Every structure is written in structure tokens, then in C-alpha cells.
Amino acid sequence: MSENKALSRRNKELSRALKEKEELIEKLTTLDSLTGLPNWSTTNAFIERCLAKRLYPIGLLFIDFDNFKVFNHTYGYLLGDLLLAQFGKKTVECFKRDRGILGRLNGEAFVGVIPNATPENMRKFSDTLFAVTEGLTVNLHDTPQVKAELTISIGGVLWNREGEMTSYALLGQADRMMRQAKKAGRNQYVFHQILQPANTGQNGKQEDMFFCLASQIRGALENGEFEPFYQPLYSVQDNIPVSAEALVRWRHPVYGVLEPGRFLPLFETSGLIVKLDLYMFECSCKNIRRWLDAGFSVVPVYCNFSRLHFLKDGFAQRLHEITEKYHVSSRNLGIEITENMLVEDAQPIIDQLWELRGLGYSVAMDDFGSGYSSFGMLQELPVNVIKLDRVFFNRDLQDFRNTSIICAITSIVKALGMAIVCEGIENEQQIAFLKGIGCDVVQGFYYARPMERSRFEELLQAGRSGCSIVEQQHTDAVRAFVEQVFTDYFVKQNFEQFAACIDNQVEWHDLFCGQPLYGQEEIFPHFAAHIRGKKFSLIYRSITPHHADNFIPVSGEAILVDEGTQPPFCRNFYFSFNCIRTGGKLTLIKFNMHFIRADSYVNLFRAQREIKINQDRHLDERALLDPYYSMLPLGVIRYELTADMVITYMNDVMFDIIGYSPEQFYGEMGGNLRQIVHPDDLNLIYQNSLKMIEGEKVEPFVYRFIRHDGSISRVLYYQCTVEAADHRPLIQSMYIWLDSLAL
């Protein structure tokens, strides 16, 4: 019997403990931990119940403290939290008396909900809230009492009509009223009443439309009624599109095509903006895949993202998964953010941006100069495109101060190694000014308005696009870095400046050392013995940056001239650089020079003469060779031996192998085959090619191209030296496309 009593007692204890835990879990999931007020999820559910039960009129008060950040910075976050908790405790009871609730939305924002409300009792509630706020005082144990001396702004909305309405739309209206209160000077109450019958006139129609859209956004997103329009960005110098921005439009079944100003605020207040951004990004990935498959000349597309994405881990990986799903390279896409996203709690956003840059995405900062611009922060950000806000170009360009600011910003941005885009460009005067100050790219109605996909495809199909401004900036910066390293080491012979460009553990192998050297300690004695004191100069034949995941490979050819000998002794060499970028600065981690021994290949004077001839008289062999080589089942390229791989002939099979149309290959890559060779195979190609040029027997070998769509193409390669019809020396390269062979 005693055992049964003990078991019964134990069961009661367990039941009581379980009930307490369930109550705790419910409390944690329904109440705000700081204030003890209902959290937004609970408040939202209460509004939805009021709407479902038609407890009209339904009143909503959106309460937000004015300048609360100043209080936090002055007295500390602990006192700030105590103040919010005290505010909630003193105001919650007055809402309960009318069967309403006061909930905490976030931060210093609260929402009061009153069923069966009237304008009079909503005013009464707001007066109570003002009085409570005016009397708030807080203090910690053993510290003086602090009178808060804070104010609040309140937006009120009263919903009193039949028809569809959502809690988010109602909150959005109250939020708008609260913002009007802040604009009116803060410490204000702004009220908006919606009564039956429906309003008439234009204002009434606009309001009807707003509430109609508010109730439809979720379903419209699920039904795919939103789509990207594309606005091309143009090169000022070349008048060709170099990138585009994806801008959302709602193709509404009743109202037609709606611009973002009509509906984006609804998405932002409802939290659905996250879903909309990802939906737009995926639409653009689908479209890019479509354009690549059609052989269009594709430019990078920039997509806009809300701050909310960056506050959760895994955002960068989520985007990467979407691009992988459609087999689209990150080089075809860009991420666009606004500068005000970084005003508060910026570090999590910066960390995510670095991760995106590491995955190969370009990052653009929009609206620069419109709010909280800081060049101090700019140099730390993983941003490579700055979009100068249209506000500068809405002003008079004859105003010296305005144009001085534009020139200064342009110079600083370019000095930081970033590209600059000027927004809102609409007339010839602005274009002429921007050409004069060296602006890279413009966006605005002067060139094109946002256009639907079909019209944008016509632009791409025409093939009038160039390499993206980001890629051009990257290429120019890398080339300048390579020239700087060569100049500091061989020409200026300034080892201190040279050392600032290289990693502490750099691997270095120039023409004058038999084995690789590691680190500055090994390089300096070699430099002092073999380089210092000699009179060197350099002629660059090519400098080609490539793409890789974790570093920047560079290859090229140059001539090292020793002017201390008579006649000057010339060494033609192939070189390879491996660089990394840290904090916006390039650093050399590996360097190799390989001497080209073939006497017939080049000497200084012949190279200069031949290159000049080839610039004046380019050889085009297509008409002569197409009847023969177009029939072959292999790729053929012929290029001039004494120029920088100037192609004289390339058959259609070769374009199929590399996955570029002729317009894409010559327009985007400048006809430079090195740029699309897989970085891991560059050294193999150069070594074997040089052996073939020098007459050594080399068996055909396999290497890889990176195709236009990012996929890999494997080829079996062989080359030989031939003569053109006018007797100039040519290299003829032949390629068998291994991936196309049946296994």
C-alpha cells in the first residue's frame, strides 16, 4: 500500500513538473523575455483573431521611442533595457481593461491592439502612453535614479470596414502614421481612420488599392505574379551595356504592371521581403541560364537584397546553392546593398559580404552619398562597385561645389580600386561631364529604362555588350600590380618597395637563380648579387589575369633587356604570378620566370617592328581557310608568332569547344584564349608550347578550358609552326574535344 502511495505521489510530482515546464515553454514562446509583454507572434495572432471575429472597429497603435539610441549610448544598454521593461509594466494594464493587448514588436517599438475601438478611446490610450513615458525613471542597485526625459511617437489606425485585411497590412499603415509623427517633430500622435462606405475620388481609390494589395501580396508571390525587369548599365566611353540591375515588377491581374513603390513597403513591414528577394534572384539565375543556352552575350546581373538576409548565417551558401542549381557562374551575378544597411551592427553584414566575395560574387553599394557615407568604413568593406546616388545629378552641374564633390568621390573610389557607377543620368550634359572626369559606367533613362525580359534579350542577342566594369577594374589592377613588382625588382631595384608587394614566405624563381628561393631572407642576397647595379628595362607582350577560387593566377610574356651590354642583350620569357587579395591589397605568393630559348622566336628590334606591322595590317585568313578547316571535326586556331596571340583564323568547331560565340569571345575576352584556360593548366601549356616552338618533340597532351557558362571542356592539344600566305610565322593549334567523344 505504501508503495502505491509513493508511486502516486511521484506521478503527481512529475505531472506538476511537466505542467510547469509546459507553462515555461508557452511563456518563452508567447512572451517577450525582457518586458514580459506578448511578443510579435502572439500580438499578430491576436490581431488575426480580431479580424476573423470581425471585432470592428479594430484600433492599432504603433509606439516607438524617439532617440532611444542616444539614451543607450549615454547610460548604457542595461538601463535602456530596464526602461523598456518599466514602460511595458506601467502601460499593459490600461489595454487589458478594454480587452486589448500591448505587445513588443522589436527594439524600442511596441504595438497596442484595441478591439471595438473608437477614435476617442484611441486618443485616450495615446495620452496615457505619453504620460507614462514622461514620468519614466530608472536606476540600478546603489546608483542614482535617472529621469529618462524621453519621448515617443505614436501612429494610430482604425479599421472599420468589411473586406479583406491582414495584420501585416494594418501594422504597415500604423507604421506609416508613426513615421509621419516623427517627421512632424516627434512626441506626436498621428491618427488615420478608415470608415465605411468606401472613400470616393482619387485619394480614396489609392487607399482602396493599397489595402487591396496588402491582402494579396502573399498569394501573388506564390502565384509567380512578380518578375524582374532589367535596366542595363552602360560604359560611358564605349556606349555599350556592361551589366544590368534586376528590378522587381508586379504584373497584377487588375492594376497591370506595378512599380516597386506601390508594394515594396508592404513586403518590408510583413517580413516577406526575404522571400521576394530570393525569388527574384532565382528568376534571374533561370534567365541567365536561358541566355547562355541561347548563345547570347551575357552581362552580369545585380540583384537587390534586404538587410534581413545578412543577419542570419548561411545566406551566402543559400545563394550559392541557387546558382549551382541552374549551373550559373557567380561571375554572372552581383549583390546590391544600400549604404544605410551598414549604419548599425555592421559586422555580421560585413562577414557575410566577405563570404559572398570569396564565392566569386561582385558586391555593389547603392545610393552612396545619400545618407551615412563614410570613406573610413568604405576602405574596410568587401565592396567593388560604388553607385553614386542620383541626388548629385539632380542638382546643377554648373554648381562648383556639387561638381567638386562628384569629382572627389570619383577619384577616391577609383583610388581604392573600386568601380564607380553614376545613377539617374538623363541628358547629354551629364554624359559629357562624366566622360570628362573619367567615370566608368552610368545608369539612367538617357540610355535605357527598366525593360521586361523579352526586350532585354533583344539587346543581349544583338551582342553589343562588353566585359563587365568589375572585371575590367580587376584586370587593370592586377596588370598594374604585376608591372609594379617587375619595375621595383628589375628597373628601380628598390628592394624595400618590392618587399612590400610580396608575402613573407613567397616562392620566387627568376631567370638568374637555378632553384626557387623562399622568403625575403633568401631573395635579398640573390638580388644584391645578380640584379642590383644592372641597367634593365622591360617590354611587356602580354599580362593575362585568370580566375581561380582561392588566389589570382596571372600569366604572360615579356622581354627583359640588359641595356648595359652592346648591343643590348634581350631575354624573352614566360612568367606566372600567383597573388592573393587581402583587405583590398594584392600580395604575391609565387613567381616563376621561364626563358624562351628559340632565337627565331623574338629579339627586341624584330619584336617591335613585327608588332607594329601587325597592328597596321592584321591578317585575316578566314576566307582562305574556311573551305578546308570548316569541314574538320576538330578545333583549329592560328595566331601570329611574333605578336601577342593575335588570332588570324578560328573555325566554328573551336567556338563550340570553348562555349563562346564569336561576339562573346572577341567582345568579352578580347580574343585572348589564355583568359579561359583553366588556371591549373597554364604552366603545362606554356612549357609544352615553348618546347614545340623550339623544335622539341612533344606528344599531344590534355588540358581544360572554362566555358562561358562556367562548365569545363577537356581537349587533346597539339601545335606546330607554319607560315602564312605572306610568309609571316604562325602557330597552328589543333584541338580534339574529348567531352564530345562517345565513350
Image (cartoon, rainbow, N blue to C red):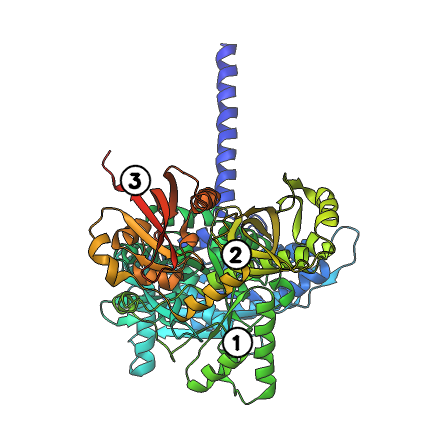
Q: How far from the left and from the top, in percent, is residue 669?
A: 40, 59
Please tell me which residue lies in front, 595 or 743.
595
Please identify, in this view, whether the residue under mark 1 or under mark 3 is nearer the observer: 3
Question: Which residue is under mark 2?
Answer: 104
Tell me which corner region of the image, top left, top right, bottom left or bottom right, holds residue 725: bottom left
Of mark 1 and mark 3, the one earlier in the sequence is 1
What is the three-letter code of the residue carrying label 3?
A: Leu
Nearer mark to the viewer, of 2 and 1: 1
Q: CA distance from mark 3 to mark 2?
A: 64 Å
Task: Give the CA distance from mark 2 to mark 1.
Answer: 51 Å
x 48%, y 27%: residue: 15
Q: Residues within 10 Å of mark 2 (few under 14, many from 20)?
A: many
Give the residue at the far front of this rendering: 566
| Residue 264 point in image, percent of width and height | 39, 66
Relative placement, left or right, of 635 versus 677 is left
Q: Amino acid at mark 1?
A: Gly
Q: Where's the C terminus, which quadrant?
A: top left
Residue at which label 1 appears: 438
Q: Which mark is residue 738?
A: 3
Q: Are marks 1 and 3 in contact (CB under 8 Å)?
A: no
User: Residue 671, labelled with which disc?
Assistant: none
Expressed as whole percent of the image width and height from the top left, the position of residue 333 reads: 41, 57
Left or right, 508 with reference to 161: right
In this rendering, does residue 314 appear at all?
yes
The span from disc 1 to disc 3 (Cα, nearest Å) is 46 Å
Q: Is residue 59 visible?
A: no
Q: Number of labelled discs? A: 3
Of residue 730 and residue 436, the one placed in the foreground of this image is 730
Q: In this rendering, would 168 be left or right of 374?
A: left
Amino acid type indicated by mark 2: Arg
